[in-house]
Amino acid sequence: MELLINLTINGLSTGMLIFLLASGLTLIFGLMHVLNFAHGGLFAWGAYAGVWFYSITSSFTVALIGAIIVGALLGFITERLIIRPVYGDVVPQILITLGFMLVISEMLKVVWGPNQIAATVPPALSGSWEIGDVLIIKYRLFIILMGFLVFGIFYYILKRTKIGLIVRAGVINNEMVQALGINIKRVFLLVFMTGAALAALGGALMAPYSGVIYAEMGMDFAILAFIVVVIGGMGSFPGSLFAAILVGLAGSYMAYYVPDLSLAVNMIIMVLVLIFRPQGLFAVKG
Amino acid sequence: MTILLEINDIHTYIEQYHILQGVSFQAKKGEVSVLLGRNGAGKTTTLRTIMGLNPASKGEIIFNGVDITKKPTYEIANMKIGYVPEDQAIFNGLTVEENLRVAMRKEDEAAMERQEYVLNLFPDLKKFWKKDGGYLSGGQKQMLAMARAFVNEAELLLIDEPSKGLAPIIVEKVMEALVEMKKETTIVLVEQNFYMASQIGDTYTLIDDGKTIQSGLMSELIHDNELQHRYLGIG
Amino acid sequence: MGKINLKSVYFWLIVLVFVLFPFVIDSRPMTILLTQIFIFAILAMSYDILLGYTGIVSFGHAMFFGFGAYATSVMLKNIDSSLTVFFLSIIVGMVIAGIVSFLIGLLTLRLQSHFFAMFTLAVSGLFLVLAEKWRSLTQGNDGFTFRAPEIFSDRINFYLFVLFCLVLVFLLLRLFVNSPFGKVLIAVKENETRTKALGYKTIYYKVVSSVVAGVAASLAGSLYVVSLRFVNTSMMAIDVTLNALLMTIIGGVGTLVGPIVGAAIIELAKHNLSILAKTYPIFERWIIFFGIIYILAVIFFPKGVVGTLKEKWEGRKMVRQQAMKQKEDAA
C-alpha cells in the first residue's frame, strides 16, 4: 500500500512538472498553430534562473518569481525575434524554433559554465512526513500542490475572464476572433509570454527535485511535453493536465513494476492515441 | 444619400490564384446592397477582402471616407463593421452567451441593452443561452452568427449567404430579422436565393469570374429576365 | 542537348578531381576531413529528400544515422571485422531504418506536418535513451572501439569507398527526384491539398520519401563509425539532426547539390573553429554561432548558397537569352 502511494506521489509530481511545460505549449499551438520547439530551452532557463536567484537571495519564493520573470522576458524575445518573422509559414517556423532551442541551451553554458550545477531543496520544504508506514517527501507534495494551484488559477482565468474567453475562442477559430475586432497578435504575445513563464516555473521547481541542472535538461523534458500535447489534444488546457498526469503515473508505476517497459510506455500511449484518436483525447476542434 | 462603402477595382490573390480581378461597387448608407453571381464568382472573397482576411493586392476600399484597404482585420472590425461569414464560424465549444460575449467590446449597461435588443430579434437564442454553440441547428447557428455581428453597434454588416442550407421556414425567419436590421444599419449581402435577395435588396452588383459585370437597382433587375438568365441561371 | 552533356562532363570532371586528390596531395588530415565531408554530404542529401523535395520536417534524422552507426559497429565488433560483415551491417542498418521510418511515416504523415516533426523528435529521443540504457550492447555514452575491415586501414581506400558511396547516392537520389514519382513529391510540397484533389494518394508518396531518406541516412551512419572506428550515443543525439539541417539549409534546400556544398562549408567551418577554440575558448560554443547563422538563414536566406546562385545564374541566362533574341529581332 505505502509503495503504491509513494509511486503515485512520484508519478504525480513528475506529471505536474510536465504539465507546466505542456500547458503553455498546447495553448501556444492552439491559438496560432505555432509549435514552439524552443519551449524546453525556456524550461532550462527557468531552472538556472531559479538556482541562481536562490543562491544569491536564499529565498525560494524569490527564486520562483525570478524564474517566472526570466521566462516571461525570454518568451517576449522569442515571440518577437523568432516566431513573428515567420508567422503562418509552417516549415520555417518549425525549423527556426528548434534552432533557437539549441542557441539558448548553449547560452546557458556561456553564462553559467558547461558543467552540471547542484540544486538544493530549501530547508522549509526538505525532509518528509511519516504518516503510518508511508513516508511522504515534502518537496514532491509541494510540486503537486503547485501544479494544481497553477491549473486552478489558469482554469479560472480561461473560464471566467474576458481574456480567457478570447483565448478559448481564438483556439477554436482565430480568424473569426480577429473579424470581431480583437488584435490576436497581442493576445498571442501575452499567451506566449505566459506559456514561457510557466515553463520557466516548471524548470525552477524541477531543479531541487532532480538535484542537478544541466543545459540539455530542457530537451529531455520537452520530449515528454510533446508526447503529452499529442495525447491530450493540441490546444486543450485540461487535456494537457490529464495527459501529463497519465504520463507521469505510467512512467512511475512502470519504472517499478516493469522497468524494461518504462521507456516504451509513453511511446505506446502516444502511438495508440495517434492511431485511434489523432486529434488527442480532449480534442478542441470538431 | 451618402456613400458608406466604396470598392474600387480590387484585385485579390489567394495563394497563386487571381480570384478577384476588378470588383467595384458602392454601398449607400441605409441600403441593402446585394452581391449576386454564380458559385465561385468571387462574392465571398469580396467580403473577405473588405474584412482584410484576404487583403487586396490592388485597388482601394473606402469606408466612411477612410481607406481601409491595407488595414489589419481587427482594426477594420473596430470601425464598426460586422461580419457574418459563409460557414457562420460559430465558436463550437463556447456557449451561446460566450459566443456573444467574445464579440462585445464593452460589457456595460448600454451593451447589455443592446444584447437584449439583439436577442429580441432572435428569440430562439435565449432558449439555448447556456448551451454549447456546437449543438445548435443550422438555422440557430445562422441566427447566432448574425446576432454576434450585431451585438455591437454596426454601421455596416457584411453577411454571406444567410439562407444557405436552411429550410424555407427558417429562411423566412432570417429574412424577417434582416428586415429589422436593415432599419438600423447598412448591409452588404451575398445571396444565392434570388427571391430573398430581391425582397430585401435595394441595389445589386453582379459578379462573374472575379469581375463586376454590372450594378444597378434591384427593381430593374427583377424585370431584366435576360440578365437573370445569363448570370444567375434563373428563368 | 549540348547543355546536358556539358553538365555531366563537369560532373565527372569534378568526381575525377576528387578521385585523384589524395594521390596528388598526400595529406592525411585533409583526406580525413574530405571523408567526413562526403559522409555528412550523404546525410544532408538524405535530409534534403524530406525537407527540400517533400516539404516535411523531421527532427529524428539522428536516429536513422544511429541505426547505421550501431548496426555496423556492433556487427564489426561482435562477429568479425571482415568486409562481408561490413556490407551486411550496412544492409541491416538500412532495413531497420526503413522499417522504423515506414512505421513513423504511416502513423503521422497523414496528420499536420507538426506531428511528424514532434513524433520523430520524441521517437529519436527515446531511441537515444534506449541506446544509453542498453549498455550490454552499446556501452552507453562511453561507447566502444572496434576494428574496421583490413582494407580500410589505408585511409585512401576508405576515402575512395566513401566517395564512391557519395556519387552513387547522389546519382540514385537524382534519379529518384527526377522520376515521375519525384515530380509528385514536389507537387506535394507545393500544394498537398491540390495534389490530393488530382487523385494522388499523397500519404503513400510521403511515406516512401521518408523511407528513402531514412535508409540513406543509415548508410551515412555506417560509414561514419568506420571512419572513427568508434561509436557512442552522441551519434544519436539531436546534434546530428541539427548538423543535417544546417548543411541542407545553408547549402540550399531542394537542390541535392546544395547539401553537399553545405556539408563542406559546415565541416570546414567546424574544423577551423576548433582550431580557433584553442586560443579563444568562446569558440567551443560553436553551436551558438551555427545556431544564429541557421536562424538568420531560415529568415533571410531560405534558398541557401546553391539555391541563390542557381537563381542568379538562371536570371542571367534569361537576360542573355533576351538580349540574343533582341539582337536577332534587330537583324
Image (cartoon, coloured by chain):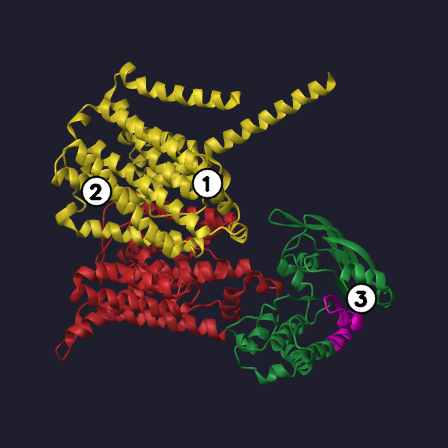
> Which residue position is annotated with label 1?
C182
Q: Do the residues bearing badges 3 and 1 touch, measured as CB atoms within 8 Å? A: no
Q: Residue furthest top?
A: C24
Residue A210: quadrant of the picture: bottom left
> Which residue position is annotated with label 2?
C71
Discs 3, 2: same chain:
no
Chain appearing in yellow on the rendered image: C
> Which residue position is annotated with label 3?
B235
Specify few, some or many for label 3: CA neighbours under 10 Å numbering under 14, 14-19, or 20 or more. Answer: few
The disc labelled 2 sits on which kind of residue? Ala
Which label number is shown at residue C47? none
Q: Which of marks 3 and 1 is in front?
A: 3
Chain appearing in red on the rendered image: A
Chain appearing in green on the rendered image: B
- Asked if one can make out residue C253 in the rendered structure from this viewpoint, the answer is no
Is disc 2 placed on a helix, strand or loop?
Answer: helix
Q: Which chain is indicated by disc 1?
A: C
Q: Which chain is indicated by disc 2?
A: C
User: How many marks on residues?
Assistant: 3
Specify few, some or many for label 1: CA neighbours under 10 Å numbering under 14, 14-19, or 20 or more. Answer: many
> Horizontal placement of C68 versus A178: left or right?
left
